[in-house]
Amino acid sequence: MISNHPRRGQRGIARYAPYLNQRWNEGCTDSGRLHRELRELGYLGSARSVRRWLEPLRGTDAPLGGLPEAPTVRQATTWFTRHPDGLTSEESLRLKPLLDRCPELADAASHVREFAKIMDRLDGTRKLPDWIERAENAELPMIRAFARNLRSDLDAVIQGLTSPFNSGIVEGRVTDLKSIKRQMAGRAGFPLLRKRVLLVAASRRAPRATKATAS
């Protein structure tokens, strides 16, 4: 009995159909090349599965459907500012041709991701000066301007991107205070404001206290 269900490899490749359709419409019919491109996007199947997928398409000049819609500015910005490991397979598939078609955007994404690594790894002392030098030489006005602004207070920036200590908690309390003041403007006096500030501060400390108690 012959099964009508697609084979395992074909089911795995189906999720990459929009990308394969797009590349086919662009004139890329080399299964080996397409397999290498899919591998870069996380595909774990074989080149044979890619060839099988393309076999029904050969001999036809009709454009394929299933092409993804153009991403919005917000979507594109989110994709290339997020860590690559945090992207879904669909997001990776849509981001790759976008960066391939726009060298300036690909360059910007590279600079942003390098800076994000410095922030994440607290590697400011070793990495930041080199990053600033490369950014200042980039053909990207906004990246150059950002790098110049970092130089204006370089010691403080390096310290902030190197030391595990920061003023984040203090800034958070200030934000809480401003938010409460805006909510209560003209509606209550200082005693109620004080109580609300103390309650919010206590709620921020609650998880840490619970963790300490549990340990």
Image: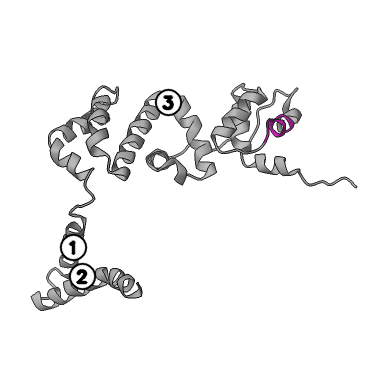
- Which residue is outermost to the left? 190
In this picture, is 173 found above or below 75?
Answer: below
Instruction: Please determine whether, in this image, residue 146 is positioned above or below residue 26.
Output: below
* Three-letter amino acid code at the position of disc 3: Cys
Q: Are marks 1 and 2 in contact (CB under 8 Å)?
A: yes
* Residue pointed to by mark 2: 201
Residue closest to the eye, 117 or 8: 117
Q: Residue 85 location, x and y as percent?
A: 46, 43
Please report the residue visible at 65 percent of the width from the left and 31 percent of the height from the top.
Answer: 64
Q: Which residues are magenta?
A: 46-52
Q: Which residue is mark 1?
A: 173
x, y percent for residue 27: 62, 21
Q: Name the residue rendered at 66%, 39% in the picture.
A: 13
The quadrant the C terminus occupies is: bottom left
Q: Earlier in the sequence, mark 3 or mark 1?
A: 3
Mark 1: few, some, or many residues within 10 Å (few <14, many ≥20)? some
Q: Residue at x 14, y 73 (%)?
A: 193
Q: Which residue is mark 3?
A: 102
